[in-house]
Image: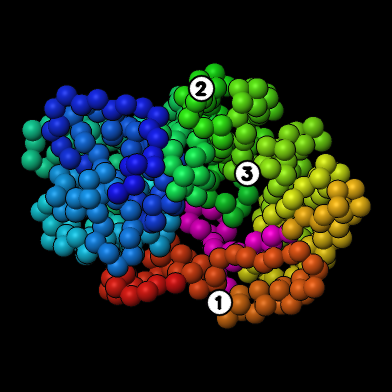
Amino acid sequence: MRKHSEIFLYPYPKQKIVKKIALVFPERYEVGMASLGFQGVYHLLQSSPFLSVERFFYQGNHQPLSVETGRPLDEFDVIMVSLSFETDILHLIEMLTLSHIPIENSQRSHPPLIVGGIGCSLLAGYLKKIANILVATDAEFAIPIVIDALLSSHEDWWLSCGKYEGLYLPEDTSSHHLPFVSHPVEKPLHTVILTPENEFPMRGLIEISRSCLYRCRFCLVSHVYGAYRPFSREHILSTAQLYQGKTNQLGLVAATLTNHPESETLIDDLNRMGFELSFSAFRIETLSPRLLEKIIINEKKTLVLAPESASEKHKHLLRKMIPNDVFLERVKQATAIGIKRIKLYFLIGLPEETESDLYDMVHLIQEISRLSKQQAKTYGYTPEIIVDINPLVPKPFTELAHVKMEDVATLKKKILFLKRHIHGLGRVFVSGESPRRAHLQYDLAWGNLSWDEILSLSKHKHP
């Protein structure tokens, strides 16, 4: 139980509790509490005066217990699950097993289980064996429908949810994938519980837009969530006011910060309100020197760059055609200001990737390292460079869905090649997703594993 360290943005007065909801995030507390979707669903459910909502997180081999009261999962009327990552399905199965709750809906009369999140779109073929309702639509649309249904007097109340677009009953789920159905939403999701044990300690997150104007071929966001939807400056600022006196740290969440037509004005407004800002992502080529400086200052002198690839052929393949010279120019501008770290994101395992393509990546990192060292002449220190190298996982719904993922052994060799050639540059550190774990994501997203294999993986230490 961790309530002592949490700060709630809203009171949740109750009239008469009709149903007790277990809200599950099948990952560690620190990860779940950093999920804007999970916090948004909590707020929507807890705002009902007739529901009590208690949170559950994955606790390894231990029986999952409520954060609020320490009660076990099997004592609740309904289980609702927010599934953000493919491998979370293995944690979910483990949590149900440890709670002595039948995994398959055909063997479970109680409690009904509702699953939402991007996992529903990617893993429906597996989830239809577990869930009573699969939700592949905006929470703001789905949750009121679910609340109305479960507060009704009908015994099998969840059956009525299947008539709504974006909510599916298992028997209506014929594919391994479910298309996400977007609905109009006016107000942004935002953090409603602040905690120092979050991956973003005591930082309030505010969604400033959904989807993305860019359609990078490898990215799920714009291919799943439909048309780009920015939230109004007024709604964002009024949401920010709720955090005053509770924290001075806010994170602006968007697929790309600069998609928002008022992004620079928003930064100025929020800084004037006394907030230090962080940003989930932005496109480097669209930044003016002035906006770049604001971002670096707010991010505590960290510059984040996502070239994905350094080779021209793969920039075109990914539809992320930002010239290497643009990245180098931004590094020059950043080091002139004085920065502490540079984060670089790259993909490997791209179609027809050769050693020459990997050398292109090495040369770009070397050049960025060389430019960053010039900062020492002015500021007396060199920024560290964190190189995040991740295997390409071809995702359903994207334009690279047809690509077969590269095998684990080859991916490992490429990572070793890059580490060997980057070694010796000084303050350069390599991180990233393990090829084995990335391949598990791929196999789960494409239904390459049998149901028995899924059950077996959930019982053992998976990657």
Secondary structure beneath label 3: loop
Residue where numbered disc 1 is placed: 407
Secondary structure beneath label 2: helix
* Residue 233 screen position, x and y as percent: 57, 22
Closer-to-camera residue (257/20): 20
Closer-to-camera residue (61/450): 61
Say if 207 sits above or below 462 in the image. above
Q: Is residue 445 visible?
A: yes
- Marks 2 and 1 sit apart, C-alpha to C-alpha, by 49 Å
Point out the residue furthest to the right here: 377
Q: Nearer the viewer, mark 2 or mark 1?
A: 2
Residue range corresponding to the magenta coloring:
385-408
Q: Nearer the viewer, mark 1 or mark 3?
A: 3
Residue where numbered disc 2 is placed: 241
* Residue 349 screen position, x and y as percent: 63, 69
Disc sitting over residue 281 in the figure: 3
Instruction: Report crowding for label 3: few under 14, some 14 to 19, many 20 or more residues within 10 A (C-alpha).
Output: some
Asked if the residue under mark 3 is in contact with the one under mark 2, i.e. CB atoms within 8 Å, the reply is no
Magenta residues, dominant SS class: loop
Residue at 66% x, 74% y is 415
- Marks 1 and 3 sit apart, C-alpha to C-alpha, by 29 Å
Asked if the residue under mark 3 is in contact with the one under mark 1, i.e. CB atoms within 8 Å, the reply is no
Residue at 28% x, 33% y is 46
Disc sitting over residue 380 in the figure: none
Quarter occupied by residue 90: bottom left
Closer-to-camera residue (306/199): 199
Q: Amino acid at mark 3?
A: Ala
Residue at 65% x, 22% y is 272
* Residue 243 screen position, x and y as percent: 49, 27
